[in-house]
Image (cartoon, grey):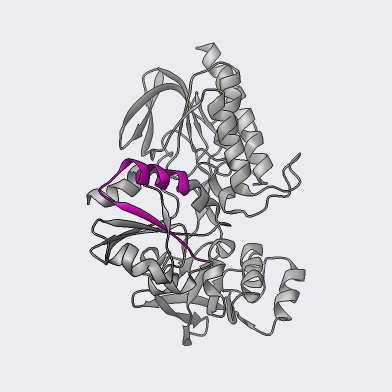
Amino acid sequence: MNIKEVTQETFEAEVLRADVPVLADFNADWCGPCRMLKPLLDEIAARRSDCKVVSINIDEEMDLAEQYDVSSIPCVVLFKNGVEAERSIGFKPREAIEAMLEA
Amino acid sequence: MTDLIIVGAGPAGLTAAIYARRAAKSVLVLEQAAYGGQIINTPSVENYPAEPQISGIDLATKMYRQATALGAEVRFEQVTAVREAGAFKEVVTPKGTYPCKAVILATGCENRKLGVADEEKLIGRGVSYCATCDGAFYRGKTVAVVGGGNTALEDALYLADLAETVYLIHRRDAFRGDAATVAQLKARENVTILYHSTVTRLCAERRLTGIEVTDTAGRVTELAVNGLFVAVGRVPNTEGFAPLVDLSEDGYAAAGENCRTKTAGIFAAGDNRAKEVRQLVTATADGAVAATEAVRYLNSL
């Protein structure tokens, strides 16, 4: 599956009401580590059907970032059943991101 | 057995990998976080020869691709120990123990922490060490910057353009950084400088809500801030090197211009080495020197 861009309008349906765990990647175009993390998230999204990966551009969606207390990016928040289960801040190897899903 | 293990995939480590591969040695680079090291957070690098202006991430990616195209293997594993094993060395990560003949330690530096309670817990929830990385989250907000060097002054100036109010907190009565930047800061109406002061407590609920500042007279003030930017210097990542490498008083790896440490076959390169100038170009220079010395060492075995 591809990574879907999510906005304030679609966040509830795409993330909070999703029937699988969601990795929500808060990022921005100007953020170097975000650009490094992107291909790893693409890989996870392509390989796994037991989870979903979405992207939130903080320059467009600052309210969402604030709502979830995101103040440093990249920040990948894992949502399970509409609730934050864990988050990872900064660039991490793919295994570390996937480890959140196994927990 | 791998000829050379390089710990750290920043500019020093990747340059060392390029040189060692061109000398036909087998190379494994171990990196705990992202390749590129400190420069990946630099929006624009303008002092690297032949690249008048390039983003840190693009420059790092070029170095990474050059090293891997030459056959260097890069694995993302955190090195927990480096030790001697008879005539050889061993590098340990949570995934295994890698035997090798020579090691280049190119582990760089990390941001110095303030050392107040809950600091680590609040990283990414109001506490930051990089104004250009995280400043965007504080448009129209109130922030504090701690430190007295150029990084603190430049961070405060950068944030003054974004935030509504900036407090600059410094433990002394004068700044170490450039007088011109200090003058620029003093001219900003939204910047308040607190001298003789340190941050003694972080106030937080789900995220940072304020800081407690104590001055040298013992007066305690609580400031409501949305963000705290810590710019109190950097510390070398040399923890655990001690038995094999002498460290300077401030923790840098003692190795001369030839990057040799006191242990034969172990070299130090880049920002973690005791030296005068820590710049991208001196890191890559160290990488070249350390690899050349390592190749000489390997050829002598």
Q: Position of residue A3 (x, y in %)?
A: 41, 52
Question: Would residue A17 appear left or right of B163 to someone viewing this image?
Answer: left
Q: Position of residue A57 (x, y in %)?
A: 49, 62
Question: Would residue B14 appear left or right of B3 to someone viewing this image?
Answer: right
Which quadrant of the view contains residue B297? top right
Mark yes or no: residue B258 visible.
no
Check if residue A97 falls in the magenta segment: no
Q: Position of residue B99 (x, y in %)?
A: 37, 23
Residue at 59 percent of width and 82 percent of height: B164
Position of B243 relative to B197 (above/below): above
Residue at 41 percent of width and 36 percent of height: B243
Position of B218 relative to A1 (above/below): below
Which quadrant of the view contains residue A55? bottom left
Q: How many marks?
A: 0
Mark yes or no: residue A38 visible.
yes
Residue at 75 percent of width and 40 percent of height: B49
Q: Which residues are magenta?
A: A37-58
Position of A64 relative to B292 (above/below): below
Quarter holding the N terminus of chain B is top left
Question: Would residue B91 appear left or right of B7 to someone viewing this image?
Answer: left
Q: Nearer the viewer, residue B219 or B229?
A: B229
